Image (cartoon, rainbow, N blue to C red):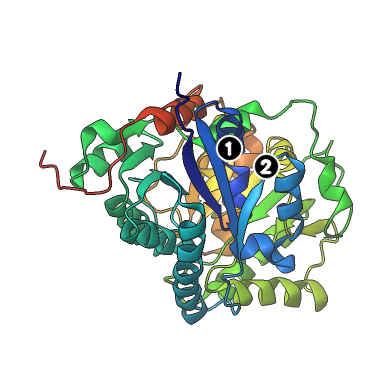
């Protein structure tokens, strides 16, 4: 009997989040009898300043990296983002030509992913997209919707998102509400992990994780020009609360240098009078979730506050516009760029404590469903607009 060829599924990892939040799905695809997983690593995954150890972590977890892309124009500006997208398209076209996958699986809304989707579309590859249909602030929303219009298979995280993707003219039979892989991964992390890995990396004071502490994750908003000022307000608010805090460095989007400078200036000029702060660049996925579920409050504008924290019940103070209009649970308090408003919201969340776990983004076995769909759904390259 003739053996059926495995379906080659290419997954580009351009930053640590792509790996962290899809690790369960990648494991399922790696072990699936009908799948041949192809991982292409690039972007900030290969840059030491953003955590060079992540490439080793991917390989140590048993994954094979078939190709690497050195596709980053450093600089943390809008022009460097645009040039990085162009270089990504150029480099990834070589990877696609060599690997010749059946499906290109794309997660999220980053500028590199848009370049990858464009390249895959021109090479007549079936594109599967995770997290389409969400709405938010910044250029990310435009990028997310653009990838949706290039993609053929859609894995959405909630019912509202499913309706939006169909409203954009996509085939309803190819839109699957599988929940958020982020929440699913958070649910799967061993409860015995305590997050103490954070005290073995980074710089600053060792944090006693048995006592209340804050986590801060504030990234640049690419459509705003005053990212440094906004970070300074958060620094001042957290400092005045005089609580232990674990502070994560920003991602590589335009504006990252301004935020990084604000942190360094505050830390090195003596403005940070609260000495109980530890600064870290990254954590391995399981260690991050272990730390997050122990945090008293997550502060900033990370989507982790919207998705993972909804399932974990972690109180969140969401600052500014980066997560505008995203579906959110009761655990999120939204505030503007104001020291007093940020402090007041943090104090309110500290008084409230943990929230009940929400299934807003969580669906059991979502990754298993994605793996089965990816290995069985009919593939095609020519799209058409579906009127609803």
Residue at (58% x, 56% y) in the render = 342
The percent position of residue 303, horizontal first and vertical second, equals 52, 48
Mark found first going from the N terminus, 1 or 2: 1
Q: Are marks 1 and 2 in contact (CB under 8 Å)?
A: yes
Q: Nearer the viewer, residue 97 or 286?
A: 97
**Count of picture labels:** 2
Residue at (73% x, 60% y) in the render = 51
Which numbered marker is on residue 249?
A: none
The percent position of residue 299, horizontal first and vertical second, equals 61, 51
Work out whether residue 90 can be spotted: yes
Which quadrant does the C terminus fall into?
Answer: top left
The percent position of residue 44, horizontal first and vertical second, equals 63, 64
Outermost residue to the front: 1
Q: Which residue is mark 1?
A: 26
Is 106 placed left or right of 195 in the picture? left
- The residue tagged with tag 1: helix, strand or loop? helix
Q: Which residue is mark 2?
A: 63
Q: Is residue 114 above or below residue 2?
A: below
Alpha carbon distance from label 1 to label 2: 8 Å
Residue at (48% x, 50% y) in the render = 334
Packing grade of label 1 (10 A; few <14, some 14-19, many >=20) is many
Q: Nearer the viewer, residue 116 or 9?
A: 9
The percent position of residue 277, horizontal first and vertical second, equals 81, 58
Q: Nearer the viewer, mark 1 or mark 2?
A: 2
Residue at (51% x, 39% y) in the render = 307
Which quadrant does the N terminus fall into?
Answer: top left
- The residue tagged with tag 2: helix, strand or loop? loop
Packing grade of label 2 (10 A; few <14, some 14-19, many >=20) is some
Q: Is residue 221 above or below residue 357?
A: below
């Amino acid at each position: 009997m003739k053996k059926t060829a495995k379906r080659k599924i290419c997954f580009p990892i351009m930053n640590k989040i792509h790996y962290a939040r899809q690790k369960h799905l990648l494991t399922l695809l790696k072990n699936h009898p009908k799948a041949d997983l192809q991982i292409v690593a690039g972007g900030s995954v290969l840059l030491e300043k953003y955590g060079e150890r992540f490439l080793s972590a991917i390989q140590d977890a048993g994954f094979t990296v078939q190709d690497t892309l050195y596709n980053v124009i450093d600089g943390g500006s809008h022009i460097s983002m645009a040039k990085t997208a162009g270089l990504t398209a150029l480099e990834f076209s070589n990877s696609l030509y060599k690997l010749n996958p059946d499906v290109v699986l794309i997660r999220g809304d980053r500028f590199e992913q848009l370049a990858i989707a464009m390249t895959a579309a021109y090479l007549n590859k079936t594109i599967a997209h995770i997290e389409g249909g969400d709405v938010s602030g910044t250029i990310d929303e435009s990028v997310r919707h653009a990838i949706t219009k290039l993609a053929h298979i859609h894995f959405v995280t909630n019912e509202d998102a499913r309706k939006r993707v169909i409203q954009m003219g996509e085939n309803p039979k190819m839109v699957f509400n599988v929940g958020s892989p982020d929440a699913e991964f958070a649910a799967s992390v061993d409860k015995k992990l305590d997050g103490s890995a954070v005290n073995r990396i980074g710089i600053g004071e060792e944090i006693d994780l048995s006592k209340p502490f804050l986590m801060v994750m504030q990234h640049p908003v690419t459509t705003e020009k005053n990212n440094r000022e906004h970070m300074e307000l958060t620094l001042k608010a957290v400092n005045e609360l005089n609580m232990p805090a674990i502070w994560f460095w920003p991602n590589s989007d335009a504006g990252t240098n301004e935020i990084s400078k604000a942190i360094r200036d505050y830390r090195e000029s003596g403005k940070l009078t609260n000495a109980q702060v530890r600064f870290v660049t990254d954590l391995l996925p399981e260690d991050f979730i272990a730390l997050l579920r122990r945090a008293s409050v997550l502060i900033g504008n990370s989507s982790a506050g919207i998705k993972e924290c909804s399932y974990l019940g972690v109180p969140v103070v969401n600052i500014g516009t980066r997560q505008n209009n995203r579906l959110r649970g009761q655990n999120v308090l939204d505030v503007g760029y104001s020291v007093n408003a940020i402090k007041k919201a943090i104090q309110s969340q500290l008084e409230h404590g943990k929230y009940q776990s929400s299934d807003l983004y969580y669906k059991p076995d979502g990754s298993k469903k994605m793996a089965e769909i990816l290995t069985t759904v009919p593939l095609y390259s020519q799209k058409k607009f579906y009127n609803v």
